[in-house]
Each structure stands twice: as C-alpha cells, then as structure tokens.
Amino acid sequence: MRTVIILSKRFLYIAVLIILILFFSARPSFAQGWLYQNPYPTKNTLLAVKFVTPQKGWVAGEHGTILYTEDGGENWEAQESGTEEDLKSISFVNEKSGWAVGNGGVVIHTEDGGKNWVKQSDSRAKLHIVFFLNENEGWVGGSMGTFLHTRDGGKSWNKQDIGATGVIAGIFFKNSTTGRVISGDKVYRTKDSGKNWETSEISSIKLPTGGYVSPADHNWRWSVIFLDEKKGWAAFGYIFRTEDGGNTWQDQKVSKEVSVGGLSFLDKTTGWAVGKDGQIWKTRDGGKVWKMKSGYRPFVYFLDSKTAWGILRNHKSKKPGIAKTEDGGNTWKVQKTFDNDVNIRFFFVNATTGWAVGEEWGFDRSGSKLLNRFILNTNDGGKTWVTQFKDVAGEKWGVGDGLFDVFFIDQNEGWVVGSKDLILHTKDGGRHWANQNSGTKSDLWKVQFIDAKRGWAIGNKVVEGSGTSIILHTEDGGEHWYVQWKKKTDWMWLHQLQFIDENNGWVTGDINEYSGDRILLQTTNGGKTWTKREFRDIYFIQIFFIDKERGVILTEKDQMLITKDGGKTWDKQRIPIRRYPWHVSEVFKEK
C-alpha cells in the first residue's frame, strides 16, 4: 500500500502517524463492539528467522522480540529475550542451543530452546549477523567490519581482521577452517580458520523494477544466508539467490508486498522470510513462490473475531481491492477492485451494513496526485459496494486532502470528517449527504457520537513553525459545532478519540515532532473541562476504556499501558499474542 508522498519533514511525520492510526483503528463505538486486531504474531518488524526442523523455529526482531513455533508457524509464543535492542540475526545448531545478536553489541544465548536467554556480550558495535557451526564454535559480524570468533560457545570472543570496513552481511563456514564472509560488494574466503582471506567482487544486482544496484550501496540493510558452499539467499528488501557462493545473484521475483528483513532455509526447497509488520512468509519451491503465514495486513477493520474487511493488492495486476475475511484473516476474498492506489477507512453497524471512505491516488513524474475522494456503502456484507459520494479532485486539492474518518450511530445516521474542516452528515444511510460547518479550517481526523445529538471531533491545523489542535463538540447532531478545547503550540497533533458515555472521554496526541512524547486529555463532564497528562518516550497507537476506571493504551514495542483507577496510575504490560483479534476487556479478566 503506497502512502501519501509529502515533501515537508513535518508532514511526512504526520503521514506516517496517520497510517499507524488507521492500521490500528477498530470499531470506535462502545465497549461491547470494540476489538483490537492484534497483528499476529507481532506488529514489530521482524529481522531474523531460523528453523531447525520443519516444525520448530524462531523469529527475532525489533525491541528484543523473539517468538517460537513448534508447529511450522501456525502458532507462536513469545520468549523473553532480556533486551530491548533490535535483534538482527539468530542462529540455532539444534533444538536447544541458539544465539541472537543485534544493536548495542548484544549477544544472547539459550541452552533450553529459548525458555531462558542469557546475555553473553555487550560490545559497542552494532551486530548484524551470527553463525554457529556447533555448540562451541561460532562467528558474529557487525558494523565497521566487526568480525568476532568464539570457540567456547560465546563465553569469550576474539576479534579477527578480514579487511572489511562496512557491515558484515553474511557468514558461512563449512567447517572450522573453511568459510566465507559477505561485506559490501565483496566476498571474503578463508581456508585456514581466518588467518588469511581471499577476496572477490560481487557483480551488481539487477532489480526486478529495472536498473542495477551494488550491494555496497545498501550494505547496512541486507542479510545473507547460505545452505552450503554454493547455494545461498540474500534479503535485500527483495529476495535474491546465488548458486556460486555469492559472486552473482538472481532475483527470486517475490511479491512487492514482501519487504524482507531475514531468511532461513531448511533445505534447497523449504524456507521462511520475515519482514515489516510481523510478516512471516514461507516457500516450498526454493523461493519461486512465497505464501504469507502470519503478519499484519494494512487497513483491516474487524467486526468480530472472524469477520473483517481490508485492502489487499493483487500480485499480478498490482491493483488494490477491498477484501473480506470470515475466518480471522486466514483467507480473503476480493469484493471490489480499484484502478489506482487507495486509502480507506471502514465502519460497519452490523454484519451486512457498512461504509468505506477514503481517497484514490495516482502517480506521475511530479509525485502523488489525488484523483478523487469517495464514500461507498454496502448492505450485503460487501458483496456489492455502491458509490454514495464522489468528489473529483482536479486542481483544487493537494496531497493532504482527504476523508479521514466515518461514524454511524445506526443504519441511517452518520458522519464523515476530512481535511479543511469537512464534515458530512446523512440521515438516510448515505443516500444523501449534507455539509456541516465546523468553522475551524482545521483538518478533522476522528469523529464519534454517543447518540443522535451529542458528538465530538478532533482536528489539527499545522503550518511551518506552529500548530493548533482542537476538540469540537455538538449537542444538536452537528447543526452547530463549537470548540471545547484549543491549544496553539510549536507542535501538537491529536489523533485518537473515545467517549464511553456523555461525560467520560479521552483524547491522545503528540506534543513533540521529533520524539515519542505523548499527551492524554481526559474529561469527566462531557468536555467542559479537560485534564492533561504527559508521557515521555513512548508511542501511542490506540486508546480504549471499557468504563471510567479501566482502560488500555496500546503502544509500540508490542506493549500496553493499563489503568484501573481512571488514569491516575498506569502499568506497562506486553500485548498478549493471540491467534485472533481480542477484546481489551480480556485484560481485566480474573486469572
């Protein structure tokens, strides 16, 4: 899914934030209808994978993530790595003994299949790759040519100078004397345990999108694994294969949706790839065809634990489409196809009646181009989608214009909000839409009503060097909107909104453009007054309260903040791994 291309760094940040919000938005109505579509098994970017049998394997990634499967990847369980550093490579020599390495020079080891991980080293170098030949002998590589060797299972490490100055991307040893190392556009070979090294050049790689690229140009973000002395694969965003020990590489023509961070091959046909948004892919033919086993699919809206709608892209035509799942995301059926890229938000009042609002984008030499914005409706669960509203862009809009949220209180009455204070209202299920005037000139990102009269919307107006954030309220169904809360600062961005009744509501936002500083606004009197609480170095994704005392804030790093006293105190916990989406009320169930 392509996102909006915006030149300003400030607006690029906003675009990324909006995407995160949309990815994790769920039913914004009331407690009984809200589900968190927890990306399974994780939303963190995965950077490494290792299988030792067709059934048993591990994946590792951002923020110390390690997950384990013993059924070929159908189900996963989290393992405590003991570190918050990004883990970039993982190596197991059997079902019990393994190592993982990553940023901060961290090296962790397990002797019980990952039930317990122990830190062995904490050097300053960023470690990128680990390879163990057996339980005793292994090598790790990292930035600035860092190459370390151990003969005692990682208890001690000796530095070897192979002549490399860039990131060590791949390591393979046939035995304790014969091995090869990949760094930049060179292959380093040794036949005497690393005392001497011979080098050869890697030819430029032809990209599936056209043109050529040298591995040295992207030295920091590719990883190489070998099955034997000749056959290997490289994760380079795409996947490439070598049959000559790394001298030349061929594209595996993987789907453009795969952004690969790590690879593992059990034999010449069976392999796994991992990447962004917790994606895990599997091949049974040596990498010609890859099938997603797990991972987050963007723009997914879950009505319940099984039924959801989202945006998927056809691998052959490259066209996006609205797709539906009725088995929790295992299989999807496309319901409507678009000719251009789209951004879409969904809202369903029941299993049959729902709406999709968003924008359609084109691309030319000047970059992204907004073609139109639209409202679609279905009354048969998505089998057919009818266009209720379509506004053709022409020359009147820029890349920041669009429809950003939709909310219905029943099958007839609903609201849509968008850029430049746009509010649309319908009383007949969307057959007719009327403009409502907020009078703010702000971009409105979220809207929620608790009944046909009382509702709230949040928005932001950002110009270079300053920004204004607002909370709007109406008590007559949107005929009149007024500002309940307003703040003008160098930087602020409100992005989440939830009311559980006419009095109790919460709003989250950002208060620093360049760091993870967040704000939580709370009202107990319908917005007449708002109290503020600030959080440092943490990224909010979604907030949800099930009553005025118990609430959850979902954050990055697969973690959540939990309160049981109305937000006075917050406890941090890991988001539980689930096969299907889960209702946050499960957090508060008695164990």
Image (cartoon, grey):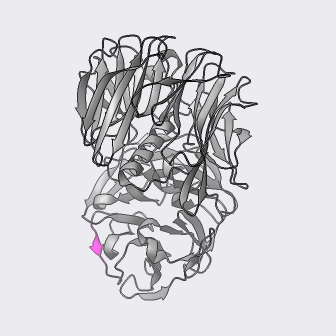
Residue 158 among magenta residues: yes
Instruction: Tell me, yes or no, whether the highlighted magenta stretch contains residue 544.
Output: no
Q: Image height check: is 199 above or below 379?
A: below
The quarter of the picture where residue 86 lies is bottom left
**x, y percent for residue 296:** 54, 42
Figure check: 404 above or below 516: above
Q: In this view, does 320 lie to the left or right of 183?
A: right
Q: Residue at x 52, y 66 (%)?
A: 236
User: Which contiguous range is marked in magenta?
Assistant: 156-161
Indicate left or right for 358 with 122 as reference: right
Q: Main secondary structure of the magenta part?
A: loop
Q: Is residue 34 among the parts visible in the rendering?
A: yes
Q: Which residue is drawn at 36% across and 59% down?
A: 101
Of 138 and 88, nearer the camera is: 88
- Picture quarter with the C terminus: top left
Q: In which quarter of the image is residue 163?
A: bottom left
Residue 588 in view: no
